[in-house]
Image (spheres, grey):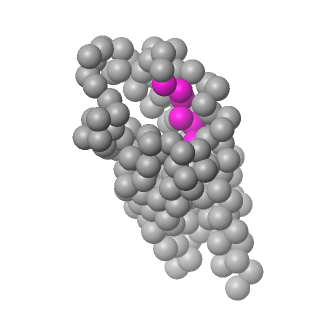
Amino acid sequence: MENSRRGHLGLVILTLAYPLTHFIVQYIPNPFVPSADIALNMIFPILAGYFYGPMSGAVAGALGTGLSAWLGADLYDLAAILPHALMGATAGLAGGSRAQFPAAFSVLIGHLLNILSYWRFGLLTFEHLNTLVLGLLTETTIDVVATILLIVLLQRWLYKEKELRW
């Protein structure tokens, strides 16, 4: 029972970490896209999925991003709710077999779905495609490295075995 409670507490912390860090990451500029930042907070749904399972990753992605959109009145976060839920769920599927790299690279799914969502809602144009691609590669690389580093550092304490994952 205590193990289950600790897992729920970890999921709550990772879910709330997204909107709480939103106000910090806005000050980390993307060196290649002047109007964008390095969204390190995208790693929290991935970590939730990896450690606790696909449904946990989806919940952390949807609720964390939704809270961030509501608290920060951010249209980009509003458009990213579904992409981040899918990204967290994908990381959860990879986490079931302790596949760190595929879980970390699920951020690429999040970025690609974000781009599609932003374009669809009129928040993004493709005027400077080279700059956009370079910025995405930079941000993806930083996110993957940060995710793998945190997985390695926290796996002993947070990873749930198959029977406790959801």
Tell me, yes or no, whether the highlighted magenta stretch contains residue 38: yes
Q: Position of residue 100 (x, y in %)?
A: 49, 48
> Which x, y percent locates residue 124?
32, 29
Q: Residue at x 59, y 44 (%)?
A: 72
How many numbered discs, if any? 0
Q: Is residue 96 magenta?
A: no
Q: Is residue 63 left or right of residue 90?
A: right
- Residue 163 to residue 138: above or below: below
| Bounds of the magenta segment | 36-41
Query: Is residue 77 placed above or below 159 in the rendered structure?
Result: above
The residue that appears at 56% across and 77% down in the rendered structure is 164
Residue 59 appears in the figure: yes
The location of residue 22, given as percent across then percent down, is: 61, 41
Which residue is outermost to the right? 2
Magenta stretch prevailing secondary structure:
loop
Front one among 116 and 163? 116
In which quadrant will I find the N terminus? bottom right
* Vertical position of residue 118 compared to residue 138: above or below: below
Residue extending furthest front? Answer: 73
64 in relation to 121, above or below: below
Residue visible at 34% across and 34% down in the picture: 123
**Which residue occupies 42% across, 53% down?**
81
Please identify the residue farthest to the bottom as the structure is shown: 1
Residue 51 lies, in percent from the top left, at 57, 60
Q: Which of 47/95 is in front?
A: 47
Q: Say left or right for 6 vs 136.
A: right
